[in-house]
Structure formats: C-alpha cells, structure tokens
Image (cartoon, rainbow, N blue to C red):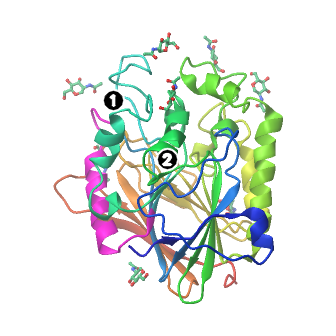
Amino acid sequence: MRIVLFAILVQACLLVVCDTDYTSIKGSNYFERPKDTSIADPYPFIIKEKYSKGLNFLAFGDWGQRGNATGQPQVAQGMKIWADKYKVDFLLNLGDSFYQDSGSTVPFNDTKDHEGVLSINDPKWKTYWLDEYGGNLRKIPWYSVAGNHDWYTNVTAEVDYFWDVDWRFFLPSLYYVRRVYFGPKNTCAVFIHIDTDPYYYNYTSYNSTNNLKKTLLQLKLNEVSEIKSRLKWIEDQLIKAQDADWIFVVGHHPLEGFCQLQSPNYYLMYLLPPVFKKYGVSAYFNGHSHELSYSAANSTSPVTYFCSGAGGATLGEGCGGVTWTAGTTFGFLYVNISDDGKDLYFEYVNCNQTNTPPKVLKSGNLKSRKYKS
Ligand SMILES: *[C@@H]1O[C@H](CO)[C@@H](O)[C@H](O)[C@H]1NC(C)=O
Ligand SMILES: *[C@@H]1O[C@H](CO)[C@@H](O)[C@H](O)[C@H]1NC(C)=O
Ligand SMILES: *[C@@H]1O[C@H](CO)[C@@H](O)[C@H](O)[C@H]1NC(C)=O
Ligand SMILES: *[C@@H]1O[C@H](CO)[C@@H](O)[C@H](O)[C@H]1NC(C)=O
Ligand SMILES: *[C@@H]1O[C@H](CO)[C@@H](O)[C@H](O)[C@H]1NC(C)=O
Ligand SMILES: *[C@@H]1O[C@H](CO)[C@@H](O)[C@H](O)[C@H]1NC(C)=O
Ligand SMILES: *[C@@H]1O[C@H](CO)[C@@H](O)[C@H](O)[C@H]1NC(C)=O
Ligand SMILES: *[C@@H]1O[C@H](CO)[C@@H](O)[C@H](O)[C@H]1NC(C)=O
C-alpha cells in the first residue's frame, strides 16, 4: 500500500517548524481520542498523509441497503474492479452508509432491521460493509461523513467504531481535516470533511420520530449559533488551506441543482456555497440525492459540485438543474489527479446491471487552483 500516514501534528505545530515523528498507522488505532470532546466538536488535529504518486480515489454514498430495487452488490463489484485496476489510495464515503431495507415497515430502531447502526457491535458492520467490499476496497481507508440515515439511530456508534474497532471506517469526529501531500512535487490537497445534517434539518420544524432530532439536541446542534460556529470553523480551515493546490469539501447533502431545494428543510445549507466560492474550493463532493451528477465550475463560481449518491440504496429520479446527470442508475465516481498535481480527471461509472461490466458514462477534467486560467 502506498499510504504512509504521518503522525498527527497539532495545528499549532503547523505554524512552527517541528520534527515530524513518522509513524505507520496500518492496522492500528494510531492516535488517541481527545478527552472531554463531543463527536460534534471538530477533530482538533490535522491528519497528514503522503503518497508517492498522483492521487487516485473513489467517491460514493448512499449504499448500505437491502431489499427491492437496491443495488449495493453491483456497485461494490464495479468499485472493486476500479480499486484494483487503479490501486486507489482511499475512498470518500459520502454518508448514508446504513439503511433499513427498502420498504421496511418496522420502527427505525428495530433490532433486526434498523436505520444506521445500533452500536459498534452491530452485525451490519460485517454484513453491509466488510463482507460487501472486496479486493483493494477492503484495505484502503474510507474517509467518511455521516448522512441523515446514519443519524436516525446511533450516529455516535459510527465515530466510536473508528476509535474502538477499525480505523478504516475513518470518522474521528463529525468534522475533520486532512492534508494530503502527493507526487514528486509534494502537491498538497486539503480535504475538509463536514457534517451537513445540522445545516439541512431545521430542529424546530423537524418532527420525525427517529433519533435525528434528539441527537441534534444532545450535541447542541439544534442551536443556530452552534451551527454557525461550525461554519466559522470551516472558514478557518479554508483560510489555512490557501496554500494548497486543491481544496475539497466533503459532505452528505447536495448544494447545487434542483436537489438543493428538494426538502422544505433546506434550512441553513445556503450559507455554505458563498464560503466555498470565496476561498476557491476546487470541488464539493456529496451524496444524498440517489444519482450521479455534477455542476461544473463557471465564470461566477470556481467550485465543481460532484454528486455521487447512487451507491446501492433505491434510486431517485435525478434532480435536474445540473451540468450533467446520469438519470436513474447505480454507480460511483472515480478521481485521478496527475503525478505533477496539475490535472484532475474524473469519471462516473455505471454499475446498473449485475450481468454486464461497469461502464464509464461521463468523464471530464479540472485544473488545480494554481493552474486555473
Ligand atoms: C491515474 O493515475 C495514475 C498515476 O497515479 C496513472 O498511471 C493512470 O494512467 C491514471 N489513470 C487514469 C484513468 O487517468
Ligand atoms: C418487493 O419484491 C417482492 C418480490 O419480488 C414483491 O412481492 C413486493 O411487492 C415488492 N415490494 C415492493 C414494495 O415493491
Ligand atoms: C425504539 O424507539 C422507541 C421510540 O423512540 C423506544 O420507545 C424504543 O425503546 C426503542 N427500541 C429500541 C430497541 O431501542
Ligand atoms: C450507541 O452506540 C454506542 C457504541 O456502541 C453505545 O455505547 C451507546 O450505548 C449506543 N447508544 C444507544 C442509545 O444505543
Ligand atoms: C425553522 O423552523 C421554524 C419553525 O417552523 C421557523 O420558524 C424558522 O424560520 C425556521 N428557520 C429557518 C432558518 O428556516
Ligand atoms: C411535521 O412537520 C411538517 C412540516 O414541517 C408539517 O407539515 C406536519 O404537519 C408536521 N406533523 C406533525 C405531526 O406535527
Ligand atoms: C455557476 O455555477 C454555480 C454553482 O454550480 C451555479 O449556481 C450558477 O448558476 C452557475 N452560473 C452560471 C452562469 O452558469
Ligand atoms: C438502472 O436500473 C434501474 C432499476 O434497477 C432502472 O430503473 C433504470 O432504468 C436503470 N437505468 C439504466 C440507465 O439502465
């Protein structure tokens, strides 16, 4: 595996010269959980990674579901082929990792068929995740964010699972930052992983009986001032990332196309794009909308919005109002940044059928922040 993760440095350390203690983290919990913090507190350290060549990764969300018209196995199969062929470095898991069966009629927290996971010991960790994704997908880290279905039962268990069981389901907190150096020129890509649920669901008007509302309250993310303080944190990270060749933000909910407004609870999401635009974010990755689509950067916004929410849960109709959409199909997104760090190549891969090979539906290119015209 090409991955070598640096020892984690405190943010303050980045501002001064400090000796780096290189530690291989493969197969172990490699740093300690900060004491007296909540999962809603941004992870206080910047995670550093180094790769010798260009970056290769997959991005997908909305996957762990069984039942009628779901497609988890064929997407897993397609991703395995790509992950093995391109030796992908990691995967961006865009959330909604675990669902109830489609058409389920039992309560959200039924012990046998529930939303999300019940605990770190839930059998779904094995049956919906470990057993489904083979080959290289079983070796690489899954840099995760939480989606609404993860919140519906016990979102804390997903963070605990990272700390207590398997770091490959990478979720040290609901908010965290990675600084990724790659290629011979030590190109830098910053990934800011955020939880968009508090921006999407208005605590006051949200009245479903699952645990989302209760958990927002427990984490104090029912308070607009708290949500805005996370926005301030995102902005601070973007300011610190200004030296980077690439800046990526990773979240669950869509910000572009008609999907952004599909819910009456659209709420505080609108606060995010202006900040992304102001600080020159290269791309935002999201799921939630069960489709493959993207909105390209243009003369008024430098941000490309990649939606990859067709990982296996029952498909939506597609949203429209975007540059391109695959319509109703299962699949994933593959991203390849060149060794010299200048060019990002992406392709959306269709995995709709179990009996036909996955097929590239759409591909395109982006230029790094430093080489944008
Ligand atoms: C992806 O990147 C690698 C180098 O990191 C390169 O060898 C390969 O050809 C690229 N693949 C695609 C499909 O762009
Ligand atoms: C699910 O599939 C079963 C068997 O194919 C069928 O009998 C049932 O009506 C389907 N349910 C829904 C909600 O589509
Ligand atoms: C499921 O949730 C309901 C309502 O919140 C609660 O009364 C019940 O005890 C929960 N069941 C389990 C198995 O956690
Ligand atoms: C959530 O999962 C964690 C980790 O397994 C567990 O400690 C906690 O009791 C669970 N919470 C509920 C409400 O079941
Ligand atoms: C949240 O919902 C409440 C109750 O419906 C409403 O009064 C408030 O305006 C909503 N907040 C936002 C920012 O939409
Ligand atoms: C739940 O909220 C929706 C919209 O916010 C509202 O239309 C609906 O009447 C509410 N349901 C209950 C049971 O309060
Ligand atoms: C430019 O892109 C942004 C973000 O995708 C979009 O909201 C806006 O409508 C686009 N503007 C034009 C002129 O296409
Ligand atoms: C993909 O499969 C779904 C059902 O599994 C079907 O409704 C849809 O039309 C298919 N899309 C394509 C592009 O083949």
Rendered image quadrant of residue 62: top left
* Tag 1 and tag 2, C-beta contact below 8 Å: no
Residue 77 drawn in magenta: yes
Residue 232: horizontal and vertical position, in percent?
81, 51
Is 18 covered by the magenta stretch?
Answer: no
Front residue (pair 22, 190): 22
Question: For the residue with label 1, is its CB less than 8 Å from the closest atom of ligand 2?
Answer: no
Identify the mark at residue 101; answer none if there is no mark: 1
Amino acid under disc 2 = Phe
Q: Secondary structure at mark 1?
A: loop
Q: Position of residue 219 (x, y in %)?
A: 69, 31
Between 156 and 366, the residue placed more toward the observer is 156
Question: What residue range appears in magenta?
Answer: 65-90
Q: Amino acid at mark 1?
A: Asp
Instruction: Report the residue at 35% width, 73% height from top.
Output: 87
Q: Around disc 2, counting alpha carbons within 10 Å, would you say few (fewer than 14), some (14 to 19), or many (20 or more)?
A: some
Q: Which residue is depicted at the point 73% across and 69% down?
A: 241
Residue ID at (66%, 85%): 371
Residue position marked by numbered label 2 in the rendering: 162
The vertical placement of 346 against 160, above or below, is: below
| As drawn, 203 above or below 6 | above
User: Comparing marks 1 and 2, which lies closer to the viewer?
Assistant: 2
Q: Is residue 352 visible?
A: no
